[in-house]
Image (tube, rainbow, N blue to C red):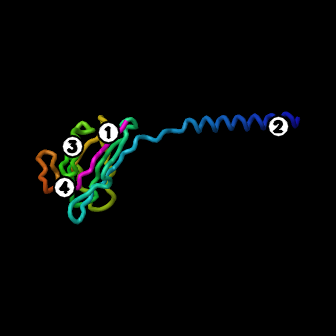
Amino acid sequence: MSKQLVTGITGIAVGAGVVLLALSLFKAKPGPRTLTIGIYKTASACEVDFPVAVVSLARKEKVAWQSQDADQDYTVIFQPSAQTSCNDSGTPFGRGTIYVPKAPATGTPPTPGGDLPINKGHYCYEVFKGNYQTTPAPPSALCEDPGLHVKD
């Protein structure tokens, strides 16, 4: 009887080990992330959280911009930039201009949905203070110039 008990306990232990191993191999992959780039005013201009951002096309990572200022909206325009001698053109998205609304006066800004890149490569973009979706942005509204790199 004790031999059967030891055999039974050994079987249960081996079975539990196999189940734990199988579960560790089939961990759920995290969903695609959204990289949120904050834009904010400084004493002399405006800047972004990340001077250069990298996202993965293969992992379907999104990019979103969010104003940190309750009194300032922004426009992100994908274009070559003389400010940083970035000559890459085009957009990783289906559009080259992205409007970024003001932050709410109180509370936490809502999390932006983000845009999913459709092309890989390095892209120059400039950030302007104000809404320039339909009119050309004046040089005086230009913020610090960042860049976006989409890999994979």
Q: How many marks?
A: 4
**Pointer 3 and pointer 1: residues touching (CB < 8 Å)?**
no
**Pointer 4 and pointer 3: residues touching (CB < 8 Å)?**
no
Spatial CA distance of label 3 from label 1 is 23 Å
The disc, 1 or 4, on the residue closer to the chain's N-terminal end is 1
Spatial CA distance of label 2 from label 3 is 73 Å
Spatial CA distance of label 2 from label 4 is 75 Å
Q: From the viewer's perspective, is 4 left or right of 59?
A: right
Q: Is residue 139 above or below residue 123?
A: below
Please tell me which residue lies in front, 44 or 27.
44
- What residue lies at 24% left-to-right and 39% top-to-bottom? 91
The disc, 2 or 1, on the residue closer to the chain's N-terminal end is 2
Q: Residues within 10 Å of mark 2 (few under 14, many from 20)?
A: few
Q: Secondary structure at mark 4?
A: strand
User: Which label lies toward us, 4 or 3?
Assistant: 3
Asked whether residue 63 is drawn in magenta, I would say no
The residue carrying mark 2 is: 6
